[in-house]
């Protein structure tokens, strides 16, 4: 697998339009309460959820499973239905949870014990009887849960594939949620993280310097850590990159210091210069490494946002460049000041850059 993913599945042996509409309403409600606003155009959003009826399930793909247990409890309670949650990481970690009417009925998991079998929670097949197809017995499920020699070295992946087949889940979508966006039967909901401040600026030439200006007040304490997160995507394939200009009184007064530059989750030495007390960090899109598995795309990428997988990156439009970086620092002494971030497109960039700047978080 090589990544982390998860999805939710509502047991619906008879397709019911009322249930489908209720699921859509619940997704909208929970996303709104989590700080996301629904948008009409996919290119304006940061998160897409696909709701897909298939066989005996209505599946929810693209759901953030950071709180998988809480999400499954919520949907099973609100729908008075059985809900299956699937979580997987690489090829050796699998967790399956069965929920009914707001309670966890059973779990199969080697999540915290993935180096060794038997798994942490082996599961009780009899508790799954209600969601098994008519031609599948609890003995079949029990046997599917057992690793065999053919699975080596991907024991957990082999188990998950057998269970997916037994339960009549759509295996194509379990491992590649982006395919759900291509299905006519799917309900697509796109949301934008309202915590991200969008700068929807496009220009035929180089945009003005001030168009990408973001200021944050800093209350610094000695040795307190902080983080600056920002990201964006080019408006076209001809963008060469950007210079991140960081300045402000917090730097002038020596209140804070940047001590790390992160790109694609790996700490790097920044290509930076100091100009009139401004830190210039150059991001050249042509030097960015393409994540494994999507090397066929004619574009360059940096991690767009903190996400459990590269699925959002992989489906970016061709000839668009997505980047996401964050800087860590610490306070040198107590005091207050500002940090100013400006994004300057590199010379010879023929298109503007669409910028999203995530607010600075102090005290991380």
Image (cartoon, rainbow, N blue to C red):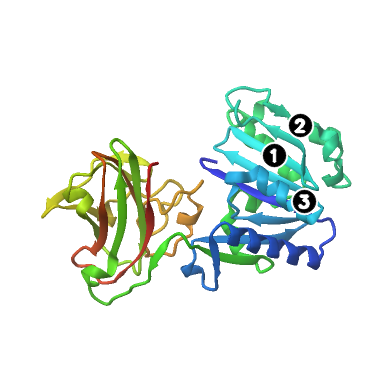
- Residue appearing at x 23%, y 63% in the figure: 344
Residue ranking furthest to the front: 335
Q: Secondary structure at mark 2?
A: loop
For label 2, the residue is 123
| Left or right position of 215 against 2 | left
**x, y (%) of residue 83?**
75, 48
> Do labels 1 and 2 touch, CB within 8 Å?
yes
Q: Marks 1 and 2, Cα distance to the nearest angstrom? A: 9 Å
- Residue appearing at x 41%, y 58% in the figure: 297
Name which quarter of the figure residue 132 lies in.
top right
**x, y (%) of residue 78?**
76, 55
For label 3, the residue is 77
- Residue appearing at x 79%, y 63% in the figure: 19
Q: Marks 2 and 3, Cα distance to the nearest angstrom? A: 21 Å
Q: Nearer the viewer, residue 175 or 119?
A: 119
Q: Quadrant of the C terminus?
A: top left
Residue 256's place in the image compared with 126, above or below, is below
């Amino acid at each position: 697998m090589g990544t982390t993913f998860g999805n939710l599945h509502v047991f619906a042996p008879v397709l019911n339009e009322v249930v489908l509409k209720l699921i859509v309403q619940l997704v909208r409600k929970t996303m709104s309460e989590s700080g996301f606003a629904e948008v009409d155009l996919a290119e304006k959003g940061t998160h897409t959820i696909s709701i897909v009826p298939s066989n005996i399930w209505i599946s929810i793909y693209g759901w953030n499973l950071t709180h998988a247990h809480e999400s499954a409890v919520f949907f099973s309670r609100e729908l008075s239905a059985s809900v299956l949650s699937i979580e997987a990481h690489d090829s050796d970690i699998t967790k399956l949870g069965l929920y009914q009417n707001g309670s966890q009925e059973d779990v199969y998991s080697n999540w915290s014990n993935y180096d060794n079998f038997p798994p942490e929670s082996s599961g009780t097949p009899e508790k799954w009887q209600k969601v098994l197809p008519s031609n599948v017995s609890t003995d079949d499920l029990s046997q599917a849960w057992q690793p065999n020699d053919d699975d080596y070295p991907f024991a957990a992946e082999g188990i998950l594939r057998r269970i997916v087949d037994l339960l009549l889940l759509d295996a194509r979508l379990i491992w590649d949620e982006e395919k759900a966006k291509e299905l006519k039967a799917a309900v697509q909901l796109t949301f934008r993280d309202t915590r991200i401040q969008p700068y929807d600026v496009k220009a035929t030439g180089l945009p003005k310097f001030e168009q990408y200006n973001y200021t944050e007040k800093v209350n610094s304490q000695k040795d307190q850590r902080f983080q600056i997160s920002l990201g964006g995507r080019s408006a076209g394939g001809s963008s060469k990159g950007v210079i991140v200009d960081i300045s402000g009184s917090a730097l002038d007064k020596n209140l804070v210091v940047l001590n790390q530059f992160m790109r694609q989750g790996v700490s790097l030495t920044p290509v930076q210069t100091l100009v009139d007390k401004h830190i210039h960090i150059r991001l050249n899109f042509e030097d960015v490494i393409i994540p494994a598995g999507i090397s066929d795309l004619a574009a360059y990428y940096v991690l767009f946002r903190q996400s459990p997988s590269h699925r959002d990156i992989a489906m970016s439009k061709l000839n668009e460049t997505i980047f996401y970086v964050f800087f860590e620092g610490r306070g040198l002494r107590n005091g207050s000041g500002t940090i100013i971030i400006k994004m300057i497109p590199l010379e010879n960039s023929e298109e503007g850059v669409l910028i999203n700047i995530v607010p600075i978080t102090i005290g991380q």
